[in-house]
């Protein structure tokens, strides 16, 4: 099988990942936590070297190991989340307060409906939070005591889905390493303490890609069709929970279209596959809308008071993504949330908001010109992809001192490691940053040499998709979080294409499988 277009997409992804990793090492864009190059650079290089030389012992590749790692990872994630509980702010708090009110039978005020009219994409989160509030009430618990363990369950399912993604292509050794790296980057994150859409969507994102890969592999047609349908359902659920997984649907269809031209296939069969892709796209849209409507009903709000026309048009999100803000400490936020632009859009009609956004973009173009615009979006990509903590503690007032209550024992240890003002947090952030940059280097360098495979193309195009999403639209590194397991899986798959030292060539790749 061969595809010049597929191979070009692999090389494009590889070059992009290597570039953002090198920028992160040499000239990193400042994020909400400072990194020390004296720690990050040598640890990154050591991890890359380990990826080339280290192989796992045979006992670590037992067939039960992925199940054990997934279950243990879910327990670790739940523990870390519960020990890090704090009074988070921003949208997560707004929606949680709404869920408490609705479940208690109180009517939302005008401010609540104005919020839901502007951000109707948070209605599924409101439905999930409401269920959490109801379950918690039945057991006299706080909602977070129910929803944080749900985050842990999502981590466990995600870890096993990562194994399924990697094992068929790269073997048990790389799949185990991929699980462990995902556990470190995702399953120990401070984000575990926040009930939000990133974790809820993650298992459906990774599981949907895993199902799509199996469907694209050779096998019985009936089985492949069933797996493809399940993939469509999984990605539709992910999209209903969070908008960003739309890039998975696009990537899957593009990979399927490329696949029909990578080998000899009768014109009629090719037309059939294209028609199936079109039907799949329609099914994705229909399921996404249906699930969103179901979540709206389950949220318990008065739908008639939600004005969908108040939701900003796409061009406004593009304008938000072109904004540049500087914090009091001099840190530049590229295309992140802007309170000023949100206030400017309030009360405008869709046409007025679109005109405002177009004028804003025209002003930025006049200021920057072509070179400045390219530099801005390059900086934005480096800023988004150069943060291995994925904007943890960066939203709203979350980073203020005192957000975590004083604690001792195991809880105190977690606070020191995961709390923004913890004594060990700077080192923890540096080591995590090094792991993330090493991962990008391994994935990128491997893709520069990787042969065309449908599995690799789907992962690569998915990564390119979320990269484009966060560059063009409003975003920050948190928007990458649900896709981190896919980046890990891509690195594990591309790892086999890395150049090996001559004395280890051949034997290493066989023993790592």
Image (spheres, helix red, strand yellow):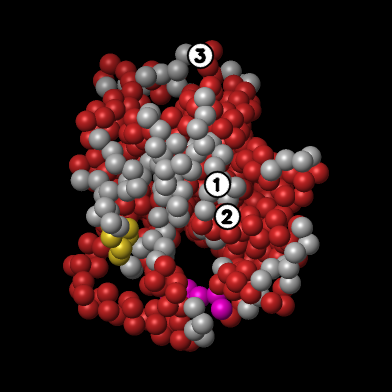
- In the picture shown, does residue 185 fall above or below 502? below
* Real-space CA distance between mark 3 and mark 2, rounded to the nearest whole angstrom: 47 Å
- In the picture shown, does residue 385 fall above or below 106? above
* Real-space CA distance between mark 1 and mark 3, rounded to the nearest whole angstrom: 45 Å
**Front residue (pair 84, 355):** 84
* Real-space CA distance between mark 1 and mark 2, rounded to the nearest whole angstrom: 8 Å
Q: Residue at x 44, y 36 (%)?
A: 419
The answer to whether the residue labelled 1 contacts the one labelled 2, judged by CB atoms less than 8 Å apart, is yes
Q: How many marks?
A: 3
Q: Which residue is mark 1?
A: 87
Image spot of residue 235 (x, y percent): 61, 54
Nearer-N-terminus badge (3/2): 3
**Front residue (pair 268, 351):** 351
Q: Residue at x 53, y 22 (%)?
A: 409
Q: Residue at x 66, y 60 (%)?
A: 98
Nearer-N-terminus badge (1/2): 1
Image spot of residue 408 (x, y percent): 52, 24
Magenta residues (range) = 310-316
Q: Quadrant of residue 135?
A: top right
In the rendered image, the residue lying farthest to the right is 138
Image spot of residue 323 (x, y percent): 33, 68
Q: Which residue is mark 2?
A: 93
Q: Which residue is mark 3?
A: 58
């Amino acid at each position: 099988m061969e595809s010049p277009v597929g191979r070009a997409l692999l090389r494009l992804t590889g070059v992009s990942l290597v570039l953002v990793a090198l920028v992160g090492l040499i000239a990193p864009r400042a994020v909400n936590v400072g990194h020390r190059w004296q720690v990050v650079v040598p640890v990154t290089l050591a991890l890359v070297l380990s990826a080339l030389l280290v192989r796992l012992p045979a006992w670590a590749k037992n067939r039960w190991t992925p199940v054990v790692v997934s279950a243990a990872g879910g327990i670790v994630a739940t523990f870390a989340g519960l020990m890090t509980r704090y009074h988070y702010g921003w949208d997560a708090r707004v929606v949680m307060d709404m869920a408490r009110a609705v479940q208690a039978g109180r009517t939302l005020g005008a401010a609540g409906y104005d919020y839901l009219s502007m951000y109707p994409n948070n209605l599924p989160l409101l439905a999930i939070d409401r269920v959490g509030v109801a379950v918690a009430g039945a057991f006299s618990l706080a909602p977070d005591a129910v929803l944080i363990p749900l985050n842990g369950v999502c981590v466990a399912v995600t870890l096993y889905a990562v194994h399924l993604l990697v094992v068929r292509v790269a073997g048990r050794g790389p799949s185990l390493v991929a699980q462990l790296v995902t556990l470190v980057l995702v399953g120990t994150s401070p984000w575990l303490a926040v009930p939000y859409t990133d974790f809820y969507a993650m298992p459906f994102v990774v599981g949907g890609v895993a199902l799509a890969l199996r469907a694209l592999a050779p096998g019985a047609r009936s089985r492949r069709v069933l797996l493809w349908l399940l993939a469509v359902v999984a990605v539709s659920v992910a999209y209903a929970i969070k908008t960003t997984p739309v890039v998975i649907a696009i990537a899957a269809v593009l990979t399927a279209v490329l696949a029909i031209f990578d080998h000899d296939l009768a014109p009629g069969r090719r037309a059939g596959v294209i028609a199936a892709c079109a039907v799949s796209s329609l099914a994705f849209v229909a399921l996404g809308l249906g699930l969103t409507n179901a979540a709206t009903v389950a949220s318990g709000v008065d739908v008639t008071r939600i004005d969908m026309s108040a939701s900003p048009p796409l061009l406004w999100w593009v304008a938000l993504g072109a904004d540049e803000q500087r914090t009091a400490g001099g840190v530049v936020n590229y295309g992140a949330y802007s309170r000023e632009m949100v206030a400017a859009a309030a009360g405008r009609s869709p046409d007025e908001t679109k005109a405002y956004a177009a004028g804003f973009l025209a002003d930025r173009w006049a200021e920057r010109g072509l070179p400045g615009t390219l530099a801005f979006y390059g900086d934005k990509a480096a800023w988004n992809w150069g943060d291995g903590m994925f904007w943890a503690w960066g939203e709203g007032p979350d980073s203020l001192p005192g957000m975590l209550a004083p604690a001792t024992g195991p809880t105190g240890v977690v606070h020191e490691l995961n709390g923004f003002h913890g004594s060990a947090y700077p080192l923890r952030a540096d080591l995590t940053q090094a792991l993330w940059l090493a991962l990008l280097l391994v994935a990128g360098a491997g893709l520069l040499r990787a042969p065309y495979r449908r599995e690799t193309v789907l992962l690569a195009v998915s990564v390119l998709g979320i990269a484009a999403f966060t560059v063009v639209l409003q975003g920050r590194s948190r928007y990458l979080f649900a896709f981190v397991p896919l980046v890990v899986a891509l690195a594990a798959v591309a790892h086999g294409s890395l150049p090996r030292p001559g004395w280890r060539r051949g034997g290493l790749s066989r023993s790592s499988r």
